[in-house]
Image: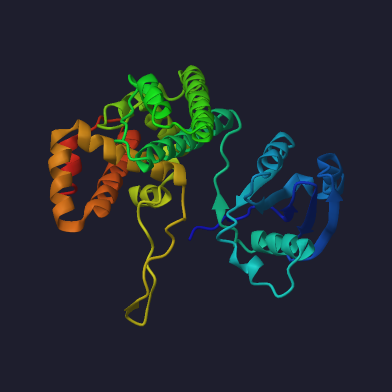
Amino acid sequence: MKYYKTTTKYNCGIDLHTRQMYICVMDEEGNILVHRNIRNNDFQFFLKLVEPYRHDLTVTCESCFVCFWLADACEDAGIKFVLAHAYYVKSIAANKHKNDKEDCRELAECLRTNRIPPAYVCPRDLRPVRKLLRRRNKFVKNRSELTGHSTSEVMAVGNQPLTISSNSKERWREGVRASFDNPVDSFTTEAELTIIKSYDEVILKMEQRIEKHARDFQQQDYRLLRTASGIGKILALTILYETIDIKRFPTVKDYISYCRLVCGTNESGGKDFGGKGRKMGNPYLKWAFMQAAILSKRADPKLNAYYNKLERKKGKHTANAIIAAKIARAVYFMLDRKTGFNVDQLIKGRR
């Protein structure tokens, strides 16, 4: 566990919500200087309250979906800001009396005593494209769910399953339509096919916009990632926009852990109580590397043979997880050392 070490005389904890924020400012000795609620998240009023301490102030709040505007506002005002990882701030949840007033006081106390586990704040100019990549991922999952449901309904009426590819989408739609005689079933099927077609059009536009805006972002790293088997345009851009800067991970173990490709341990008194922390990290990087593992064994004969060997020993899911972790390890060194992909080194590992 890594903690942020404050370097300022005054520290401010903010319990942030959509319509209000409760602030608490402390000095080095723990004396409370400001402790009050600010309605409508009025940042200008916040600046007036902290004006006497602004010259030597650090602000913190828990990571949430509304925290980025506060990070940007503090940056514009020249105030140091550290984002607290909400999952790791255990002392707040442990309080007997928990409310906004106590939460902001506890955040300020954690910041003053160097007990804030920091989270990463994505640069503001990269957030729109990253959000677009994440929404595309969500839309693709929704489309896959609807496509699978339509195929299942075709099999439910006794017909053979229909295969779909990029070159046979219209033929697949006609096959689905022809599988139902009942007018109500036909209406339901047509509604699903309309939504699927809309998803196809929107996803295509999103991919074109992503490629347009990502054209000048880390071109060298992008070309290095494309040398890896199974990593295409979208996966390469997802890895780049979710990683941002490989230098923020001191070791390859930190990066693999951040990608959710290893689980923690839970041992005490010589007994193993099972793994923990499977959902600690970045879910989008885990998805990207798991997809790369599946696609790489199809594209590279050596990786396919290595996967078959792992599958015989450990099973299908464990084999995919091992290859995904190895690809993530390779990506870390590729981005750190600016070298291309080497499948032999990935299979052999460290010697």
Which residue is the extreme one toward the bottom? 269
Q: Quadrant of residue 103?
A: bottom right
Count how many numbered circles sit on residues in the image. 0
Q: Going by the image, does 127 lie left or right of 306? A: right
**Where, by quadrant of the figure, is residue 96 drawn?**
bottom right
**Front-most of residues 204 and 228:** 204
Instruction: In the rendered view, tell whether residue 178 sits above or below residue 46.
Output: above
Residue 62 rendering spot, x and y as whole percentages = 65, 53
User: In this rendering, is residue 262 above or below 265?
Assistant: above
Residue 293 versus residue 234 in the image, above or below: below
Which residue is pictured at 32% across the width and 36% down the height? 159
Q: Position of residue 50 (x, y in %)?
A: 82, 48
Q: Where residue 264 sits: x, y (%)?
A: 38, 63
Q: Is residue 34 visible?
A: yes
Toward which corner of the image does residue 78 lie, by quadrant?
top right
Identify the residue at image location x=54%, y=45%: 120
Q: Name the outermost residue toward the front.
A: 182
Q: Residue at x 46, y 36 (%)?
A: 146
Q: Residue at x 40, y 29 (%)?
A: 176
